[in-house]
Image: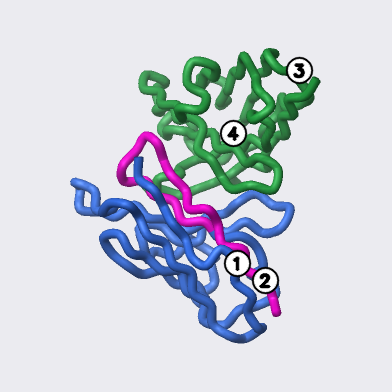
Chain colours: A blue, B green
Amino acid sequence: DVVMTQSPLSLPVTLGQPASISCRSSQSLVHSDGNTYLNWFQQRPGQSPTRLIYKVSNRDSGVPDRFSGSGSGTDFTLKISRVEAEDVGVYYCVQGTHWPPITFGQGTRLEIK
Amino acid sequence: QVQLVESGGGVVQPGGSLRLSCAVSGFTFSTYGMFWVRQAPGKGLEWVAFIRYDGINKYYAESVKGRFTISRDNSKNTLYLHMSSLRDEDTAVYYCVKDLAGYSNAWWGQGTLVTVSS
């Protein structure tokens, strides 16, 4: 199984400042079809998760452009250029390349300082 | 407008059974594979099961294999999860999800809480 490791697990950020979350996989996430199925989900307090980014760097419809994804192979990053209050929640990376099983990172809790 | 509405959660004793349903609208259900994901209280997300669009291929997490069964009725636009031999560690909010892997648009239901307790 592919192990997904996120860091940090807790991320206190000042409003308006940038934030960055790392996600590393135990093996390359490049699929035989050439795509890399690494996705990012946001879960706000008390809500269901929603997807922010798919295939490393593609923003879902309606996702603010302050969110960006990057990376390749086994090393990926979610960046928020300027954190807003509505960004509080837990962020998960998830790989859809080598499955079953689909595997999630442990989650990174973003809070406002 | 896409909607995934789970139902069927509740309190069940260890060893008991429960069937969850997920009613889908807003997209062509019969052409997409579907997932169940769960989240134990205060914990992270865990993939539970997947079923192919036509119901032929099904995959399960090791933690539920042999105890849970995923199924679907494309004529009713409904996804199911039949859970048996329930354990304390199955206590979680169960979410119905369209596309977890990143192939197409992703949607989650609001979740339904299953509590296994004597």
Residue A94 is a magenta residue:
yes
- Residue B85: image quadrant is top right
Image point (42%, 20%), residue name? B55
Image point (80%, 20%), residue name? B118
Residue A46, given in percent of the width and then of the height, sits at 73, 53
- Residue A83: image quadrant is bottom right
Please state which of residues B64 and B19 is positioned toward the viewer in this rendering. Answer: B64
In the displayed structure image, the side of residue B48 where residue A14 appears, left or right: right
Question: Which residue corresponds to mark 3?
Answer: B13
Q: Is residue B51 above or below residue A105?
A: above
Secondary element type, mark 3: loop
Distance (Cα) linking label 2 and label 1: 8 Å
Three-letter amino acid code at the position of disc 1:
Ser
In the displayed structure image, the side of residue B78 where residue A47 appears, left or right: right
Secondary element type, mark 4: strand
Q: Do discs 2 and 4 belong to a common subunit?
A: no
Secondary element type, mark 2: strand
Image point (67%, 37%), residue name? B93
* Chain letter of the residue beneath label 4 in the structure image: B
Question: Which residue corresponds to mark 1?
Answer: A10
Query: Mark 4 or mark 1: which is in front?
Result: 1
Three-letter amino acid code at the position of disc 4:
Val
Please state which of residues B40 and A89 is positioned toward the viewer in this rendering. Answer: B40
* Chain letter of the residue beneath label 3 in the structure image: B
